[in-house]
Each structure stands twice: as C-alpha cells, then as structure tokens.
Image (cartoon, rainbow, N blue to C red):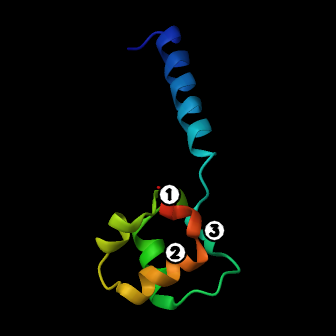
Amino acid sequence: MITREQYLLLLELIDNYHRQNKTKTPIYEAIKGKLLTARLINCLLDNFDFIEDVNLKSLKSCRNIGKKSIEEFFAVFPENLLY
C-alpha cells in the first residue's frame, strides 16, 4: 500500500507531465483550416500527436508519403524545418 505522501507525489508528477505537453500544438488543431491533401492529413493524424514532433526524418519514415507530400508539408509549416 502506498502512503499519502507517495500518492500526492505521484499526482504532482502527473500534473507536471501534463503541463509540459500543453506547450505543444496537437496535430488536429494545427491542420484545421489548412488546404492539405488527404494523403498528408492521414499521414499526420496516424503517425503524430503534435505538430512540433514532425520533421523531415520522421516524415520520410511514414508509409505512403512521397516527395510531393513532404514539399507540401514544409510549404505550409516552414517552421518545422528547424526541428
């Protein structure tokens, strides 16, 4: 059985973890209102949780994505070239 102090410490750790992820933008919010092909949208939704996690290396590892989709992504999200 865990003590009350251990339980409160675990709750604090969970809260800290959730505060960290709030700085990242979820994929769904990032692509909302953007004109993207269905292939690119499906790749992003299936393989990533946050737009900040997407870079050239991770996009190339996606299945069914090609050069045109990669170029399209970086045309719409040029800031991801820095990651």
Left or right of 31 in this view: 83: left
**Relative to 57, is 35 above or below?**
below
Picture disc at residue 82:
1
As shown in the figure, which amino acid type bears the numbered disc 1? Leu
As shown in the figure, which amino acid type bears the numbered disc 2? Phe
Instruction: Tell me how far mark 2 sits from mark 3, CA to CA.
Output: 13 Å
As shown in the figure, which amino acid type bears the numbered disc 3? Ala
Q: Secondary structure at mark 3?
A: helix
- Residue placed at 62% from the left, 74% from the top? 31
Instruction: Tell me how far mark 1 sits from mark 3, CA to CA.
Output: 17 Å
Of residues 67 and 40, the one nearer the viewer is 67
Q: Secondary structure at mark 1?
A: helix
**Relative to 17, is 13 above or below?**
above
Picture disc at residue 74:
2
Left or right of 61 in this view: 5: right
Crowding at dot 3, Cα within 10 Å, few <14 / some 14-19 / many 20+, comes out as few
Sequence-wise, the earlier of marks 1 and 2 is 2
**Relative to 24, is 68 above or below?**
below
Query: Which one is closest to the eye, mark 1 or mark 3?
Result: 1
Of residues 67 and 42, the one nearer the viewer is 67
Q: Please tell me how many numbered marks the rendered image carries.
A: 3
Rendered location of residue 64, percent (x, y): 31, 85
Rendered location of residue 24, percent (x, y): 59, 51
- Residue placed at 57% from the left, 23% from the top? 12
Identify residue for label 3: 30
Sequence-wise, the earlier of marks 1 and 3 is 3
Query: Which one is closest to the eye, mark 2 or mark 3?
Result: 2
